Image (cartoon, rainbow, N blue to C red):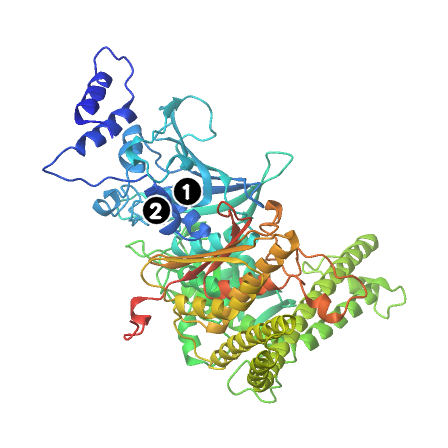
Amino acid sequence: MSSEQGVRKQLEQLLDKKNRKIDYGMVLDLASQLSEFDSENVRFTVDGNLVKRLGEQLVAKKTTALSELIKNAYDAEASKVDVIFEDTESPGGTITIIDNGNGMTKEALIKGFMTISTSDKENNPISPHYERPRAGRKGIGRFSAQKIGEKLTIVTRASAELPFLVITIDWSNYKAKSNLLTVANSIVESTDDYGFDKGTKLIISDTKEAWSDENLSTAFKYTSSIIKVNPQNLSTGVVDPGFKVVFLTKFLLSDDLIPVKTDETEFLSEADAVIEASINVDGRIVICIKGLKNLLMDESYVLPEIKSQALQQAGFRFKSHYFILARDSKRSHLQAYTKDNGGIKLYRNGFYVSPYGERFNDWLGLDESSRKRKILPPHANTNFIGSVDIVDLDGSLFEETSSREGLIENSCFSELRNSGYEIIASAVKRIAAVRGKKVTAGQQGYIKENTLEEKISASFANIKTSLEKIESPLSSEPLEQVENSDLFSDGKQRPLNNSLALTASLKDNLEEQQLYIQELIDEKNMYRVLASSGLAIAEFTHEIQLYLNGMVLNGKQLERHVHGNEDALNSAREMVSNIGMLVSYTDFFTETIRSNSQRTKHVVELRDVFRSFFKAMNPTIERRAYQLDISFEGDEFWTKPMHISELSSVLMNLFTNACKAIVRTGQPKGAIKVQVTSTSEYHIIRFEDNGDGIPKENWGRVFTPLFTTELSQGAYASESQQMRGMGLGLTITQDIVTGIDGDISVTKPSEGYSTCIEVIIPSADEEEIPENAY
C-alpha cells in the first residue's frame, strides 16, 4: 500500500495546472485512497460489484428488467415506446427501446440517470406536464439493462435544437474489488441522425439469454397490466396522449420491423368473440357475431324488438370484443387488462364522451344485470372492450350537459342505452347456446355440453358438409344459394372460381387445424400416461420398500459369511451399496408422493428440500464420483405456497439432465454446482454442470415440447428406452415454474461449467412464513 505522502504527491501532480488533461477517474481513486489515512473518520466505499447486485438480484427476471426500463419511458411522459428485438432467439442479440418522451439534458443525465437511487421521483411523484404518477421509485431501474445484456448505449436529447448525447456502458468494467467511482463512461455530443427528434433510445447489446415467444408475451402482458394510460383531457387543459408499447422484431435480411406484441395481438386477439351491430335501412339493428379462438361461430341476424329512427339518423355503430373470463390463472393477465380497460365507451362525432365506459361507469347496466343473474352467461363490464359510435354534428339528438360531462338523458339517449344493452344480452345468449352453456336460470330441457373431443368432431363434420355442398356440382342447393350462405359474412355473391378458391383455402386451413388438434390430443394423452405412471410408481415404491429392509440385513449377513474372501467381500459390499441407493430413492419418492397427496399448498423452505433431495441422490453422486457444490446466499428461503412434489420434480429433471450431459462427454470428473440466492422478491436457483452443454442457438428451444438433445434409441429399441429423453422433462419443469409465477431459462454458466439452468421462484410474503419457522 502506498504511503500517505506518496498518494498526496500523485494527487498534486494530477491537479497541477500544467496538466492540460486531467484523468478524473485517477483523481477519484487517489482521493479515495487518501481518505483511508483519516484516523478520525471512516467512510463508506462502493465496490464496483454493486452494479451487478442491483441489476441481477433486485430485478431477478429478465422480463421484469425489461418492464422496468419501459417504466422509465412512461415516467418521461412518452406516448409511445417501441421495443425492437434483433437476433434474440439465442444469446448475443440486441434489444432497442425507443421512446418519444422528454429526453435528458446533460445535467439530467449526470445527476439523474448516472446517479444511483436518486430521490427525484420521491420528491416529484407526479410528472410535470401530463400529471402521471411516477411508476418507478427506487432509482435503480436503469441497472435492469445489466440483467439483460453485456453493454448499454444511451442516446438522448431534450429537444430537436440540441445535439444528441451518447453514452456507452460496458457492464463488465464493474468488477468486484474495484472502486465504483473510478469506472468512467465516455459521453459525447453527436449531430448524427438517430431517427427521432426528442426522447431516449436504449440499445442493449450482446444479450445474455435467449428470448422465447413466451418471454416476449410475459414481458408485454406484465407491462400492460401495470401501465395503461388512455388519451384523456386533464383539468389543466393539457391532453395526455396516452401510453402505448409495441414489441417489434427485425427481419434478418432487411431492416423491416414487424410488430410481434401489441394490445391487438396480446389481448384483443384472446377474446372469445367479436360482436358488431349497425342500423339497417328499416331502422332495425343487425348483429354479427364472429367467434375467435375455440369458439366456432359466425352468425348474423336482425334484432326485431328495436326500431329507432334516432339511431338510424345518427349512424349508430357498435363493436366490442367479448372475453369469457373463468377463474383460471392462465388468463389472469386478461382479467388484469379488462379490469382496467373493460367497458363500452361512447364516441360522438369521433370524440370520446366522458365518463361513459370508464372504470366503474355502468352506463349500460351490465354490472347490475350480471348481479341479478336473470341472464347467466358472463356479461359484466369487464367482459367487454368496445365502443358505440354516433354522429350528431348539430347536437339535435344527443346534447351535451352544460358541464361537458356526459349527455343529457333524453329519449334518444334512452334508445341508445337500451339498444346497447339489448345487443349485448342477445349476443351473449347466442354465444352461450353455441358453447352448450345454460342461458337463463329457468331454462328447461338443458343438456350438458359434450366433451371437447366430441365438439371438435361435430364441428369438423359440419364444416366438411358445408364444403362438400359448395364444391359438388350435384348439390341439391342452387349454387347462388350456397354462395350466399352464412360462410360469407358480407352476404355478397361471388363467382364460381372465387368460391372454389375459397374452398381450397378452407380445406388447407382445416387440415392444419386437424394436425394441430391431433398434436394437442397426443400431448394430452402423453400427460395422462405420465400421470398414471406416477400412480404406478407410488404403488411400486410402496411394495418394494417391504423387501428392501430384508435385503439390507441379508447383505450385512453375507459380508460376515464371506469374511476373508476379498473378491466375495467386495461384491457383497457393492451389493449393500446398491441396495442403499435403492433405499434412498424409494424414501425420497415415498415422501414426495405423500406430500403431494395433500391437496393444499404450503410455503416451502428451500434449504430443507434441497438437503432432502441431495441426500436421496447422494448414493448416485458418490457412485459416479461427482463433485457436488451447494451454496446458499441470503437470509430467508421460504417460497410462495406450492407442493413440495412440484419442486422435487424440478430438481429431479435438472439433476437427471445434468447426469446425462456428463455421461455423454465421458467426463472422468463430473461436477454439479447449485447456487441459491435469496432476494426480497425471488429465490434464484442456478443449476450447473460440466457436461456436453447446450448450443446457444438452442437456449430458447429446449423448453419446447418434444425437443430433446438426446439421440434416438433406434427403431427397434424397447418402449421404455424410447420414452427416455422424449423432450418433455424441461417442458414439464417450465410448466411447474411458470405456474407459480416463476421463470426458467438457460443462461451463461460459471467458469469451469458448460450449462446453467436458472430457475426463479417467488419468495413468500412475511405473513405467509410460519410463526415457529425458526
Q: Nearer the viewer, residue 685 or 327?
A: 685
> Viewed as shown, does residue 142 lie left or right of 772?
right
What residue is shown with label 1?
Answer: 146
Which kind of residue does numbered mark 2 sit on?
Leu
Which kind of residue does numbered mark 1 sit on?
Gln
Q: How many numbered discs, if any?
A: 2
Please tell me in which quadrant of the rendered image residue 735 appears. Answer: bottom right
Q: Nearer the viewer, residue 84 or 678?
A: 678
Q: Position of residue 706 (x, y in %)?
A: 67, 61
Disc 1 and disc 2 in contact, CB within 8 angstroms: yes
Figure quadrant of the N terminus: top left
The residue most toward the right is: 474
Residue 78 in sight: yes
What residue is shown with label 2?
Answer: 54
Q: Position of residue 161 (x, y in %)?
A: 36, 23
| Circle on res. 379 | none
Question: How far apart are the two marked residues, 1 and 2, measured between alpha carbons?
Answer: 9 Å
The residue most toward the front is: 564
The relative height of residue 639 versus residue 626 in the rendered view (above or below) is: below
The relative height of residue 283 versus residue 251 in the rendered view (above or below) is: below
The relative height of residue 444 versus residue 755 in the rendered view (above or below) is: below
> Viewed as shown, does residue 715 lie left or right of 705?
right
Q: Secondary structure at mark 2?
A: helix
Q: Nearer the viewer, residue 189 or 453?
A: 189
Bin the neighbour count of mark 2 within 10 Å (Cα to Cα): few under 14, some 14-19, many 20 and up. Answer: some
